[in-house]
Image (cartoon, rainbow, N blue to C red):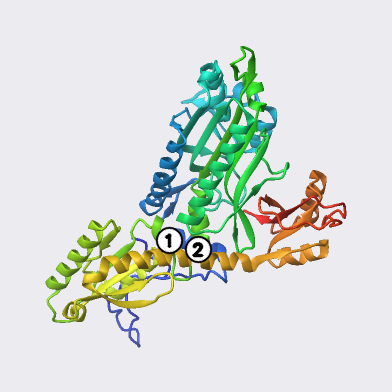
Amino acid sequence: MSSGKGGGGGGKGGGGGGKKKEVKKETKLGMAYKKDDNFGEWYSEVVVNSEMIEYYDISGCYILRPWAMEIWELLKEFFDAEIKKLKLKPYYFPLFVTENVLQKEKDHIEGFAPEVAWVTKSGKSDLEAPIAIRPTSETVMYPYFSKWIRSHRDLPLRCNQWCNVVRWEFSNPTPFIRSREFLWQEGHTAFATKEEADEEVLQILELYRRIYEEFLAVPVSKGRKSEMEKFAGGLYTTSVEAFIPNTGRGVQGATSHCLGQNFAKMFDITFENDKGSRSMVWQNSWAYTTRSIGVMVMTHGDDKGLVLPPRVAPLQVIVIPVPYKDVDTTAIVNECKKTVDTLEKAGIRADLDTRENYSPGWKYSHWEMKGVPLRIEIGPKDMANNQARVVRRDNGAKADIPTADLVEKINGLLDEIQKNLFETAKQKRDACLKVVNTWDEFIAALNDKKLILAPWCDEEEVEKDVKARTKGELGAAKTLCTPFEQPDLPEGTTCFASGKPAKKWSFWGRSY
């Protein structure tokens, strides 16, 4: 049980050097940092105090506790069922890859080289050749795609694996957002035609949008990455992009890449088409990671701790008995148990907190810290009136609900909370959106922590130049994505950075 900052301990000693009197005191709950005052410290505190993670003794690695893993499992349950409808098959490929295979696709390895971790020893002896730990699995899988795909009848080949990957980053490790080892799913598919590959890229991207918007209640923009920001070795990359108003930073939520035929050429993945000649396959790869949980924490958390959208909350309702002095607690606890039972039978994730060594007030704070969407309080008066007091985590609203209507009302409230969290987050994000047309407007908006939409000439050199000109303590600005939903671009519109004719509107900003 996390104690939060702030100590328990004894009461203050009396005056005149009197002996300290021990007073049994509950450990204080609550947050030492406020979200608006010190976002970084606030975030670290929330993920630890809500019992999502524990820091590990290797920097950039974290222990994911049940409160985080259960969220991951709920997301996995949804996504896995959806990709199975698309005829994806489960695989598991090894964690290790040899140096010569990893280096086969030059652009690809250049993109990942700085963060590849290598195994060089076994016991005390050096290995004959170092072995890499997968930063992603294209080079692990594709030599075998080449073996398994022979004819057009072997296509499409669609595989997915849920696994861990290692990227030995040295820039600011942040739990969930940027860690050296993380969990993800990675889908890898091969098709006979580009049309099929293009279609799947967007089908998967829509599933990623649903994970963020319908489950995590985080608004995202769908779009295409610039040539500079696309997946190393791929043809093009699409992504869902979130934005954190408190820090003014974009976050890449998930990516769906069309790899084109580049890897097919390197790994000789060809098939005999129906005319009897050989063709190269078209490939995709796509992934989302445990980073999604961090984006949710940053978006909805407040100064009391975590705020969980009901669809991903491991626990949707916590029931707390509120006994008064000299009142028979057994009857109250039994009523609470009955309530939990009724809710669970109706498919609501509910539990009871009967710990006797903590006061009801302490329990309220504890479950608020953990972000449980609804709290039910049951005391003698509630029992006498056949009702329960229900308190919302998102806005603190309280209501007394007749016991007979509990399931229906709780279901309604959970839907309302889910909707409210998304709408509130969307309003906050939209309030940060700034359309700019000139360099001066761009710099002002960047310094004001805005999500910037600007007309751009779509030239790599210009993006490099923007990065160079905005480099500083907070990190450089870059394109986040070119949204699929493009505002009107009047003829004669010029690029905000180069003054050349603009070809598209793109989102720009600093990012995680």
Q: Position of residue 339 (x, y in %)?
A: 21, 66
Q: Residue at x 67, y 36 (%)?
A: 232
User: Which residue: 53% across, 32% down?
Assistant: 188
Residue sitting nearer the eye, 364 or 284: 284
Q: Earlier in the sequence, mark 1 or mark 2?
A: 1
Residue depicted at x 57% and y 30%: 138
Residue at mark 1: 309
Callout in the foreground (1, 2): 2
Q: CA distance from mark 1 to mark 2?
A: 9 Å
Amino acid at dot 2: Phe
Which of these two is toward me, 3 or 126?
3
Q: Nearer the viewer, residue 111 or 357?
A: 111
Q: Name the secondary structure under disc 2.
A: helix
As shown in the figure, which amino acid type bears the numbered disc 1? Pro
| In the depicted structure, whether residue 427 falls above or below residue 287 | below
| Mark 1 touches mark 2? (CB < 8 Å) | yes
